[in-house]
Image (cartoon, rainbow, N blue to C red):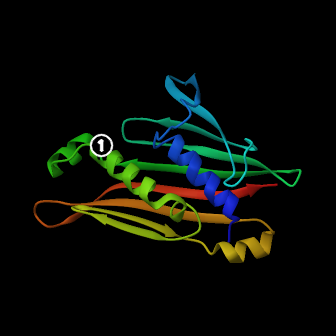
Amino acid sequence: MLDDAIRALMALGLEKGYIGKRALGEPAFLKTQFHGWLLKTFKIFLKIPGLTEYSSEYTDTYLFGDQSGGGFELVGLDDNGKRRTFMRLYAGAGLDKESLAKLGITAEDVVDFLKRVLLEAGDKTRLDQSYLAHEGNWQYSYQVMEDMDFDSETFGLPLLCSSERIFFLAPDASWHRVLKHNFIFVEVK
């Protein structure tokens, strides 16, 4: 299992970064051109719940096209004078605009649903627990695909593979997968 501090920091970084629920202003953004693509990075300094000083940081670097993309998140924290770093890699894709339009939805609808689920779920998703959520015609599923406890015991550090999917119920009563992301989470040692 993951420390409560790591769970909280990954969820808080995601909330304040990707989801955009910012209480203390905008994160620092860096934009870089990479072979014609815009690579974006942002960094946020975070407080571990219960502490008053900013002793940790969250960084997300990502590259997204119109249909697919990926990136990585880093969380660094001071743990009793020892610096610890965790990384979550991600990549995925969504249906193209034309396929979404046939279902009567847009890419923005998919992202809006994803952000609502992530905000509601907090540290219950994108880490070491499977999670399922329904809202109207939408379904969110996050599945842990590899046994983290076994890998943690074998390698002496958290190592996790997982996948998230969003499904949409079309007017013809058929479910369609409209988004899929895969994740790898590891402590960097």
116 with respect to 98 (left or right): right
Give how far across and how far down residue 19 sits, in percent.
Answer: 45, 43
| Residue nearest the viewer, comparing 85 with 96 | 85
Q: Quadrant of the N terminus?
A: bottom right
Q: Residue at x 55, y 50 (%)?
A: 90
Residue 38 to residue 125: above or below: above
Residue 25 sits in quarter: top right
42 with respect to 19 (left or right): right
Q: Residue at x 71, y 72 (%)?
A: 151
Q: How many marks?
A: 1
The residue singled out by tag 1 in the image is: 107
Q: Residue at x 50, y 37 (%)?
A: 22
Label 1 packing within 10 angstroms: few (<14), some (14-19), many (20+):
some
Give how far across and how far down residue 95 sits, in percent.
Answer: 30, 48
139 with respect to 55 (left or right): left
Residue 5 sits in quarter: bottom right
Give how far across and how far down residue 144 sits, in percent.
Answer: 54, 70
| Residue nearest the viewer, comparing 167 with 121 | 121
Q: Quadrant of the C terminus?
A: bottom right
Q: Amino acid at mark 1?
A: Ala
Give how far across and how far down residue 106 sits, in percent.
Answer: 24, 43
Farthest right residue? 81
Residue 60 to residue 86: above or below: above
Element type where label 1 sits in the image: helix
Q: Residue at x 37, y 52 (%)?
A: 116
